């Protein structure tokens, strides 16, 4: 038996992949330990140069305190991202669905324990799809995760039901490009899957991790609205609010199309991703991005300074100075903060159901952060009484 720790860098898909390795090691009889473990599993990220740097630093640090370190995930599939690290680092350059078995086989399974293991959090991330075939010109993900592919619907439904039995109040359907989910043999698209997962007895809340605006159609909108457990929150990546930049990125929509698709979701809390400093983005293009964020009523915007990625069509392009990228990033963050606070302010005096996922803090149905004194894992009705720097102050109603 080995002791191990598992962590992830990056997105919810990376988290789900790290949990897949973790559960496989637990099922094989190995013991999880926060400190002093024999083995470290680090699921890495490579979406930006900074993400690769942080991943390398995490793996390097772990190599000094663990006998073996397994670098998995997107960064591990980027050629030479972990070259030159110590000999006790094992780079697992495999597809996500093959990684748990590869790590477990190398660690050495004892094969005598087959137990259920609850994840640490009160919500569980259920991956339904991996890979992407869209080919945005700046994106390295198709190179490291491959073409889009989906899990079978019955496997997703079985895992979702198991997570609910384990005690998770909230499930998050996650994937690299959720709208590409298909199980043609069983007749499933995303909308049907949402309805059936949302109807699992005992589930209290269901969310999508992210959805491309191209896939926000009438069928999906109906499923989101008609499934009582679905959270009134949707994360829809924008990347840029300028049509010329969107074309240069290889995105498949216009600003007008983006806004039109989101019009029926005016009661949802909408969040997004924005890239600033894409090659040849000028001040006017960036100003249009800020305008689009306001027009779409976006609250939280995750901002990423453009970073050339190896193997992409914009690998050799980086025309916007770093100082300009930093300034534009700060402006997006400021606009996002103002939009969040405006939404929080409108909630004062209202009540909502809050899922408490850490001491004194949780999320309401629309995924706004609420601060309330209640046990971790509890779903409590709370009343908004004030504002804090990072969310809504509340008391149990």
Image: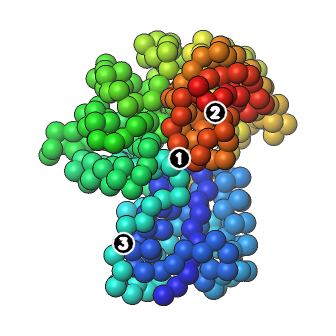
Image position of 92 (left or right of 83) = left
Residue found farthest to the right: 323
Front in this rendered view, residue 110 or 168 = 168
Q: Badge 2 is on which residue?
A: 369
- Report the Cα–Cα distance between label 1 and label 2: 15 Å
Residue found farthest to the front: 397
Q: Of discs 1 and 2, which sits in the foreground? A: 1
Is the Cβ of the residue at disc 3 closer than 8 Å to that at disc 1?
Answer: no
- Report the Cα–Cα distance between label 3 and label 1: 22 Å
Q: Earlier in the sequence, mark 3 or mark 2?
A: 3
Image position of 134 (left or right of 323) = left
Q: Residue 200's image quarter?
A: top left
Residue at the image position 57 percent from the left and 68 percent from the top: 6
> Element under label 1?
loop
Give percent across and percent down for residue 316: 65, 47
Residue 356 lies, with reference to residue 231, above or below; the image says: below
Image position of 151 (left or right of 246) = left
Q: Residues within 10 Å of mark 1 (few under 14, many from 20)?
A: many
Residue 277 numbered mark, or none: none
> Element under label 2?
strand
Residue at the image position 85 percent from the left and 37 percent from the top: 323
Q: Of discs 3 and 1, which sits in the foreground? A: 1
Q: Badge 1 is on which residue?
A: 377
Give percent across and percent down for residue 63: 68, 78
Is the Cβ of the residue at disc 1 closer than 8 Å to that at disc 2?
Answer: no
Q: Residues within 10 Å of mark 3 (few under 14, many from 20)?
A: few
- Report the Cα–Cα distance between label 3 and label 2: 34 Å
Front in this rendered view, residue 78 or 63 = 63
User: Taking the image as drawn, is residue 94 in sight?
Assistant: no
Give percent across and percent down for residue 191: 29, 31
> Element under label 3?
loop
Residue 115 numbered mark, or none: 3
């Amino acid at each position: 038996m080995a002791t191990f720790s598992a962590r992830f860098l990056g997105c919810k898909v990376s988290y789900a992949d790290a949990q897949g390795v973790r559960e496989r090691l637990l099922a094989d009889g190995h013991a999880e330990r926060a400190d002093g473990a024999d083995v470290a599993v680090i699921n890495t990220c490579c979406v930006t140069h900074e993400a690769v740097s942080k991943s390398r630093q995490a793996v390097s640090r772990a190599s000094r305190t663990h006998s073996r370190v397994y670098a998995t995930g997107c960064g591990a599939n980027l050629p030479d991202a972990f070259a030159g690290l110590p000999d006790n680092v094992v780079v697992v350059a495999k597809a996500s669905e093959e990684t748990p078995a590869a790590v477990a086989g190398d660690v050495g399974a004892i094969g005598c324990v087959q137990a259920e293991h609850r994840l640490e959090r009160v919500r569980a991330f259920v991956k339904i799809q991996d890979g992407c075939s869209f080919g945005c010109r700046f994106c390295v993900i198709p190179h490291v995760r491959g073409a889009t592919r989906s899990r079978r619907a019955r496997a997703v439904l079985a895992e979702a039901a198991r997570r609910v039995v384990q005690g998770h109040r909230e499930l998050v359907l996650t994937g690299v490009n959720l709208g590409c989910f298909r199980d043609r043999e069983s007749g499933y698209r995303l909308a049907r899957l949402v309805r059936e997962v949302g109807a699992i007895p005992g589930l209290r809340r269901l969310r999508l991790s992210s959805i491309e605006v191209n896939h926000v159609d009438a069928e999906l909108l109906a499923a989101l609205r008609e499934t009582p457990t679905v959270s009134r929150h949707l994360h829809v990546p924008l990347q840029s609010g300028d049509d010329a930049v969107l074309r240069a990125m290889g995105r498949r929509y216009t600003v007008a199309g983006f806004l039109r698709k989101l019009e029926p979701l005016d009661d949802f809390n909408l969040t997004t991703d924005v890239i600033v400093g894409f090659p040849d983005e000028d001040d006017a293009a960036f100003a249009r991005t800020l305008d689009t964020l306001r027009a779409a009523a976006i609250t939280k915007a995750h901002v990423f300074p453009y970073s050339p990625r190896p193997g992409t069509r914009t690998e050799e392009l980086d025309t916007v100075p770093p100082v300009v990228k930093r300034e534009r990033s700060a402006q997006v963050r400021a606009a996002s903060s103002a939009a969040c606070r405006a939404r929080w302010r409108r909630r004062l005096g209202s009540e909502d159901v809050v899922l408490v996922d850490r001491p004194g803090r949780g999320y309401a149905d629309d995924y706004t952060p609420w601060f309330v004194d209640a046990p971790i894992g509890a779903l409590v009705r709370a009343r908004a009484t004030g504002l804090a720097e990072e969310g809504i102050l509340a008391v149990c109603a």
